[in-house]
């Protein structure tokens, strides 16, 4: 009993510990501080959850978080994508396929809003000659130059293998994964210049005074500069452009060097709804991207079960598994109890027919009735063999019947069995 109390106490302690850990994780995830800054999943001052839920509360607005590829979102060409807390080095590290997906969204009527981390500094310089300034695919057809440089193969089989290994699809995959410098691609530049103390506020540029706030606290020292007049200044701070817009097909692209105006802290103390409304644009679908913050959805077994509502099937499989383990760990056939001596009978796992027969006897015949059952079977079959009813048979029967109704232990049963064996041996001697 003491062991049982210790086991129950240990289980209680383990359950309390597990409940505490679950509560701790629930508190952390409810606050959202486990997520990166400017994530829409954070409810602390560094997150953007207030803006996300506020926009979602507006009538006719469809809100969504993106944890994967943008081009897989339904109606992406008619949506506004927000990228808050974007690091500056990502401007020169995006892959070609991702940039092309963004360009397709903007060209189809979507709006891309990139807001950088405050004081992120200039992006990393990359020597990449594969960037296309005019956003056109200028790669030459694959195969001609390579064929000119290729030496003549030694055999037709080798020629066929080389032709298969140089498929255009492989070169397209390599091109899709190459890094792209958005500054060269979209014709803008990002510079960093420290400002005085206190930093001046950002003011609306010419043509935006009617739709933007007259003064906006700006926490970033970076500024933008465009090439060829394709970018229109939106906000200016200390004579430098800190927010700019570019028309792209039927859509537009906006770049800002700060994300503080979208944070939960700004929503509480420095809220500027006119700026947020202008950033969202006229699209009714708004998407907050989380992939650039490192939050990407990896669909595992649990995610698939939730998506296809297979929780009941999973619970049923779990119950069947537990029943299978229980069935193989414990016998479902009750064992016979020795009521005379208060001991429970044992269950033997048989490996052959003799062991199986012994196991059946243990389950069905109590020790006190064993000799009586043996006598009945012997009397039923004795007349078919050499042994016939006679004096020896009566002696054995009288010996066994004498112990019926008495409390017989194992030693006494063995003694009676040996006495019966001696009587049978006397019979064999006389024969």
Image (cartoon, rainbow, N blue to C red):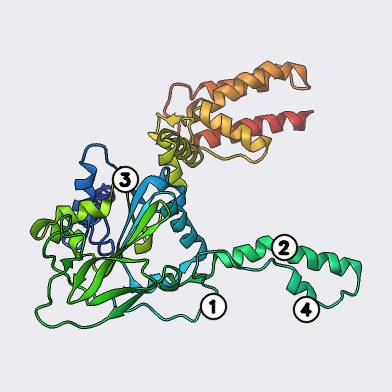
Name of the residue lying farthest toward the right: 155
Tell me what residue is drawn at x 11 percent, y 62 percent: 214
Q: Position of residue 126 (x, y in %)?
A: 46, 80
**Secondary element at image label 2:** loop
Does residue 296 appear anywhere in the picture? yes
Query: Nearer the N terminus, badge 4 or badge 2?
Result: 4
Q: Is residue 89 above or below residue 72?
A: below
Q: Which residue is mark 4?
A: 149
Q: Is residue 154 above or below residue 409?
A: below
Tell me what residue is drawn at x 23 percent, y 53 percent: 278
Q: CA distance from mark 1 to mark 2?
A: 23 Å
Nearer to me, 134 or 94: 134
Contact? badges 4 and 3 (CB < 8 Å): no
Tell me what residue is drawn at x 32 percent, y 74 percent: 225
Q: CA distance from mark 4 to mark 1?
A: 22 Å
Query: Nearer the N terminus, badge 4 or badge 1?
Result: 1
Q: Which residue is mark 2?
A: 167
- Badge 4 crowding class, 10 Å Cα cut-off, few under 14, some 14 to 19, many 20 or more, is few
Q: Position of residue 6 (x, y in %)?
A: 25, 52
Query: Nearer the N terminus, badge 1 or badge 2?
Result: 1
Q: Position of residue 197 (x, y in %)?
A: 10, 82
Q: Which residue is mark 1?
A: 129
Q: Position of residue 245 (x, y in %)?
A: 31, 62
């Amino acid at each position: 009993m003491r062991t049982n109390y210790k086991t129950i106490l240990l289980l209680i302690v383990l359950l309390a510990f597990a409940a505490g850990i679950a509560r701790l994780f629930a508190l952390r995830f409810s606050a959202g501080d486990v997520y990166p800054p400017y994530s829409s999943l954070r409810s602390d001052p560094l997150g953007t959850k207030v803006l996300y839920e506020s926009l979602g509360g507006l009538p006719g607005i469809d809100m969504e978080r993106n944890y994967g590829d943008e081009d897989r979102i339904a109606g992406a060409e008619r949506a506004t994508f927000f990228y808050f807390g974007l690091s500056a080095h990502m401007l020169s590290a995006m892959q070609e396929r991702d940039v092309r997906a963004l360009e397709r969204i903007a060209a189809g009527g979507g709006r891309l809003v990139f807001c950088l981390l405050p004081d992120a500094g200039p992006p990393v310089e990359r020597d990449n000659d594969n960037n296309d300034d005019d956003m056109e695919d200028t790669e030459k057809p694959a195969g001609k130059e390579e064929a000119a440089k290729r030496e003549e193969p030694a055999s037709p089989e080798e020629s066929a293998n080389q032709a298969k290994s140089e498929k255009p699809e492989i070169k397209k995959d390599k091109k899709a994964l190459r890094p792209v410098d958005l500054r060269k691609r979209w014709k803008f530049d990002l510079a960093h210049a420290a400002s005085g103390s206190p930093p001046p506020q950002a003011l609306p540029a010419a043509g935006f005074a009617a739709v933007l706030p007259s003064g906006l606290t700006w926490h970033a020292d970076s500024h933008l500069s465009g090439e060829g007049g394709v970018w229109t200044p939106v906000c200016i701070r200390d004579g430098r452009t800190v927010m700019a817009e570019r028309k792209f097909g039927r859509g537009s692209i906006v770049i800002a060097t700060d994300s503080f105006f979208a944070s939960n802290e700004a929503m509480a103390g420095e809220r500027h709804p006119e700026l947020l409304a202008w950033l969202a644009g006229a699209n009714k679908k708004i998407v907050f991207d989380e992939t650039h913050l490192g939050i990407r959805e990896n669909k595992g077994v649990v995610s698939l079960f939730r998506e296809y509502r297979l929780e009941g099937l999973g619970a049923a499989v779990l119950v069947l598994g537990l029943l299978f383990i229980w069935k193989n760990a414990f016998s479902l056939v009750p064992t016979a109890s020795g009521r005379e001596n208060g001991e429970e009978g044992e269950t033997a796992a048989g490996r052959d027919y003799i062991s199986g027969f012994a196991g059946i006897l243990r389950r069905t015949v109590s020790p006190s009735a064993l000799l009586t059952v043996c006598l009945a079977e012997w009397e039923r079959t004795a007349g078919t063999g050499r042994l016939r009813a006679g004096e020896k048979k009566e002696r054995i029967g009288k010996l066994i019947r004498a112990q019926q109704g008495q409390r017989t232990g194992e030693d006494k049963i063995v003694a009676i069995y040996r006495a019966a064996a001696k009587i049978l041996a006397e019979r064999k001697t006389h024969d």
